[in-house]
Image (cartoon, coloured by chain):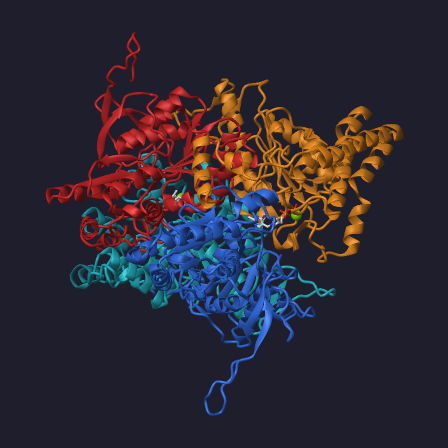
Chain colours: A blue, B red, C cyan, D orange
Amino acid sequence: MMQFARDGRREKMSSKNISYIQAITDTMWSEMEIDETVFVLGQDCGRYGGVFKATAWRSEKDGKPDLSKKMYDEFGPLRVLDAPLAENAIIGGAIGAALSGYRPIAEIQFMDFIDCAMGHIVNQAGTISFKTNGSWCCPITIRTPYGGGIGGGMTHSQSNEAWFCHAGGLVVTAPSTPRDAAGLLRSCIRADDPCVYIEHKGLYRAITGDVPDDPNFTIELGKGKVVREGSDITLISYGAMLHKCLSVAEKLESEGASVEIIDPRTLWPMDEDLMINSACKTGRCVVVAESHAAYGFTSEVAARVQEGAFWNLLTPIRTIAGPDTPFPFEPGMEAAYLPSDDEIYNSCKRALGDG
Amino acid sequence: MMQFARDGRREKMSSKNISYIQAITDTMWSEMEIDETVFVLGQDCGRYGGVFKATAWRSEKDGKPDLSKKMYDEFGPLRVLDAPLAENAIIGGAIGAALSGYRPIAEIQFMDFIDCAMGHIVNQAGTISFKTNGSWCCPITIRTPYGGGIGGGMTHSQSNEAWFCHAGGLVVTAPSTPRDAAGLLRSCIRADDPCVYIEHKGLYRAITGDVPDDPNFTIELGKGKVVREGSDITLISYGAMLHKCLSVAEKLESEGASVEIIDPRTLWPMDEDLMINSACKTGRCVVVAESHAAYGFTSEVAARVQEGAFWNLLTPIRTIAGPDTPFPFEPGMEAAYLPSDDEIYNSCKRALGDG
Amino acid sequence: MNSKKINQKQKKSFGVDQQTAFEVLYHPLLKARLLDERMVKLFNQGRFGGTYFSGCGQEATNVGAGVHMVEGDILAPSHRQLGAMVARGITAKRVLAQVYSTAESPDGAQQHPCHFGDPELDIVSPTGHVAIQVVLAAGSAYAYLLDAYRKGDVKINWDKDGIVWAGNWTLKKGSKLNCAFAFFGDGATAKGDFHESVNFAGIHKLPVIYMAENNIWAESVHVTENVPVERLSDRAAAYGMPGVTVDGQNVFEVYHAVQEAVERARSGGGPTLVECLTYRYHGHSMIDPADYRTDEEVEKWKKRDPLIVFEQVAKEDGIWSDKLAKETEDRINNEIEEAIDWVEDESTKPKPDQFIDVTFRDPKFNDAIRKRWEKRKNV
Amino acid sequence: MNSKKINQKQKKSFGVDQQTAFEVLYHPLLKARLLDERMVKLFNQGRFGGTYFSGCGQEATNVGAGVHMVEGDILAPSHRQLGAMVARGITAKRVLAQVYSTAESPDGAQQHPCHFGDPELDIVSPTGHVAIQVVLAAGSAYAYLLDAYRKGDVKINWDKDGIVWAGNWTLKKGSKLNCAFAFFGDGATAKGDFHESVNFAGIHKLPVIYMAENNIWAESVHVTENVPVERLSDRAAAYGMPGVTVDGQNVFEVYHAVQEAVERARSGGGPTLVECLTYRYHGHSMIDPADYRTDEEVEKWKKRDPLIVFEQVAKEDGIWSDKLAKETEDRINNEIEEAIDWVEDESTKPKPDQFIDVTFRDPKFNDAIRKRWEKRKNV
Ligand SMILES: Cc1ncc(C[n+]2csc(CCOP(=O)(O)OP(=O)(O)O)c2C)c(N)n1
Ligand SMILES: Cc1ncc(C[n+]2csc(CCOP(=O)(O)OP(=O)(O)O)c2C)c(N)n1
Ligand SMILES: [Mg+2]
Ligand SMILES: [Mg+2]
């Protein structure tokens, strides 16, 4: 926990090394302890602890889950609600509870199914403040696992975040590390505005990292991060693809190119200046995402950066994204669908060359 | 009707001057005559003829509606179906009928409500061919009125086409003239793939134009059009905004600038080469749409054009789009929301200057 | 049809006394009517824009439910709930500010004039999406259950194996829950949202009053084209909740039926589906000529106008008073005239760009929107 | 519970003769079981990827309905319909090609191994979205109505004023409609899609057989947390259609109930909701330990295994034959072994980029995708 010494100086913060999913569980648990109006609802979230166990166990000191007690046991069936198989009821219900004084965390089991509740998210949650002239707000957090690479096939792999960024009224955030997962989730829960918080299911147990042991640790929504400094080229990405970018950067570095990597962390609003400044500095930019190419993240970033960094760009901005097809299952196809290290590497090489 | 003279030479095609909405009605009517598997379903589409009267009257020779008989009277209640107030039933039902041999034209009364059927459109219609390895296809056409400027407020003004362009499996098309309305609609109905056909409600009765009197008149999906040739700057837009661009072009022309205007007509797939070639020629580009700025049409075009025309661009690509808010009602606000002639003009001036 | 049964009770006014009848029921009934008809006129005179959805004819249904609402109860209206809002206490000024889209309107003129609410009275401004509000109401009702739970008033009935299924809780005697009121039309019941909401409320025994206004039409679509059964209230059984059908033109009957439902809900007995048989006199909105229905149908319903029925019942039961009726009317007319003068002379125009500053609660998000918008404007 | 009533009929096998019992019912019942258990094993041995949804325990429900399908009838399955597909005639090879994701699989290995169909048999490959397929079925059924209409076999019953409401048509005597079969679980009935589909089919009297498989669980969620009423079949009344509950472990009973429903639907009498009480032996999918339920519950149901019940009933009614049973089993085992050998030794791998070429029917749209994808690959 963050502590202040008697004289007001901040002491060294303790932290825990935990997995990406554990950071999510711990943060919800801690917020439910602090604030009685926070509650969780979703399919299989209660007794079962969620299909990915995101609503199951808090971590112990060593960062491992404390299997003795589930969130359901701690907070009871009303605050850890096994919701019906009805996405409209889950989201619409969360919205109603939010208007009546609560801060619901609604889980959509896979982001692929979020389209079932699209009307409630975009045209109800996203418009509450607007249509009440700011009198009401809608403090809901929608958590949902997205992304491919785990053999999920067509409807267990999608990355539909662009829809919510193109909605007008929603904050969309996508952590790439355990630390960001904790800090951004807490910010979403505490925000008075509706937040779509997407979790890359491929990262759940694949990565661990230090997370401050502080019940007030937050990360500002809308602020990106330079996750690696460099001077020759800017790589922009998030989620599982960010980790691919990091390994490509190592390789490029070993070949003498200095790579800057930016993680926007929040997808709407976007930390435009951070990206533009970096591209101005390096003069070259590659944007990577696994979502569909058309009308998605990579196009949005490219459009903004070309405008803001136009006079400094030395080569065209390259975009690498998923093809505009449904998500295939067969492992070879899944590999063909997802951007690969090689593709990122080659695009960087092109950008570093004559474009 | 298009005719071929005995010697095979094409004779001059006759045409009719009709409104944008009349072109839509006439095309559906003609397709229903030609093909018994074509039918129409939607709320109020039957006896009432649709809330905008799109499924009401065919035109007479003079282009005016023949008020003596509605589509419902001509084809009966089973082929002009008054559907229940249930968007999932409408789209899901259309999909089922399509798999069983029909070519349904489903009307969503306002595009704002299309989010209610998002799951069926994206994850059912858009995946039929994919998930049957091409054995089945899903020849449905979803017609829906979009766009603002008619005092419709928050949920009768939206332009959500980007969602469907970012879906992977859907064709999205947006006619801007009566001729394109007819040609593209017929192509959609005849296509074996699912098409989202969006109609700008502000154009319904505001514009008229010549439409070939040919029951086989089609316009290729995916092909854009140079609607005005010029050499100094490229303007790219569609729908009501395209018409604003046209009038700005007149003004700029009168001031000595030569403006090229491109209407992509189909939003997915996009006629990228047409836009890139134009931008390469003019070196300057402004993209205009009324949909949200973030992750929308203008960003998509800017991203593609910057990449394809990088070495020829003289100034940054400017994008003009709706703000990322819900759509406001009050007339002054609506005017502030929608891109204006002045804004387009000023952006062109900047692009023509030093950017 | 349950209305038959109810009608056979002794008094058609269910023992409501004269003062209550006039203060609580007649006043909002008449106010809703006079205000509504006036707005129809003002719209037809072009004094405000957009369009207008009239609830004329449906006032008894709305008032009979709306008057049962107390502080903290949420009202989730559809597009024809003027009567319920008036019963809840909305002023003519607030309503007119709304339809005239002035800066003083509850939604700051952002919303369409006919999709309106009033946050001060816990009335949610609806989206245009039919039936979405029905789900929201279930969510608010879940919040009311949590409120009671946090106060320690809800006992969860774990079984001996430490298991409990949904809805298995009891409310402490004497404790009362807030209620959520959802209004929706016959057409709306064809939507999946309706189903998901009543199903959820049925599972968790939530305090929701489902007010189904069966006015025969959904725009031009006949109720038989949206609902394959005779009585909407018959659907309640599919959700394990009581369903009643009442004469929606008789405010006493609606009042009584909703009272029963509210008492049950507040004491932890769960939701009720109340179908009200009613009718809208005008077209779907002002631009609808409503030529899909016959004049006879309209006339038939007008004979059972809520105001006529009120007078009949009150007279039969000896609680009618010409004087009170006249006084009520005068009071309402004053309020309306004053409000119109105010809205036309004194209300102000909203700032054209204010919607950007209220899209989010957190100003930094709105600033992000503004920044791009201003760039577009080349400022 | 209707099953009671039905059980009181004279013969528990409803007069089905021995040959039919074995050819039509026992064969698919056993084939589904043996194939299913085999796939569970293959999955656990890591011989194919993804995950696997077993339908073990639910074969009687599936077979009793699937065998009524004829050419042109569409099957809209959920994720546990192996039994129905086998009854419809799917071969072990097709199924194994599917779960092994080979080039020969009906979906070309594009889909998840457990969401599969077979276009050759009019079996739609489901999306992962629970309940969406239920709506599709209603649409196909509407197409069947149009088919008959185009043949001149449907009379629309206009009233004297030239008006007709939905569902007011009659089918020419002797004409037969195709039927759409929709399968879905207890959990799925909580979704709005279920409601919109049955409502639509109820309004238009569409030939749909709604097969509700009530297996008590939706993943870890208990049926009482998805459905606030005792019997799913009670919901049929809300849609103006007949509803029955049958013993889903007794293939004769399912066969008989669906036969009645199919006859009604084909002759223009509209849809039926058939609730089958059944159980899944394995977890929701292979990765679910299913620790939310008790061993006793599983054992209780296994005592009423579809194969045991078949044998009991057949014996009671004197149509059992050890010889036929043995022959059937041998035949099936041969088919399965052959299919496994084939799939493991002879089937081929799909091209990694083939999905791009089948996203659309029109190659030019696929080319547009490919172009951008190849640019990404820097080729
Ligand atoms: C999701 C959705 N679909 C369609 C519409 C268009 N629409 C507005 S009101 C209406 C009819 C509503 O009928 P009903 O529910 O009976 O209410 P009433 O107008 O009779 O009060 C329709 C179809 C809409 N607003 N929302
Ligand atoms: C729209 C949607 N929401 C959630 C899921 C996740 N999910 C898959 S199967 C399932 C439970 C299905 O239960 P039921 O309908 O009873 O069918 P059963 O598995 O018992 O056969 C859930 C929640 C999904 N696939 N689709
Ligand atoms: Mg109605
Ligand atoms: Mg189940």
Q: Position of residue A179 (x, y in %)?
A: 52, 69
Instruction: Using residue A230 as the reference point, say whether residue C355 is left or right of it.
Output: left
Residue B352 lies, with reference to residue C89, above or below; the image says above
Instruction: Using residue A46 as the reference point, say whether residue C109 is left or right of it.
Output: left
Residue extending furthest toward the front: A256
Residue A60 lies, with reference to residue D273, above or below; the image says below
Q: Nearer the viewer, residue B349 or D148?
A: B349
Residue C31 lies, with reference to residue D36, above or below; the image says below
Query: Residue at 23% of width from left, 24% of height from top?
Result: B16
Q: Position of residue D333 (x, y in %)?
A: 80, 33
Is residue D165 at least partly visible in the picture?
no
Query: Residue at 59% of width from left, 43% of height from top?
Result: A332
Location of residue B66 by image quarter: top left
Residue extending furthest toward the bottom: A7
Q: Nearer the viewer, residue A81 or C77?
A: A81
Quadrant of the displayed image that contains ligand 3: top left
Residue B92 lies, with reference to residue C81, above or below; the image says above
Location of residue D327 by image quarter: top right
Location of residue A99 by image quarter: bottom left
Q: Position of residue A288 (x, y in %)?
A: 45, 53
Residue extending furthest toward the right: D322
Q: Quadrant of the N terminus of chain A?
A: bottom right
Query: Residue at 48% of width from left, 85% of height from top?
Result: A10
Q: Position of residue A262 (x, y in %)?
A: 43, 62
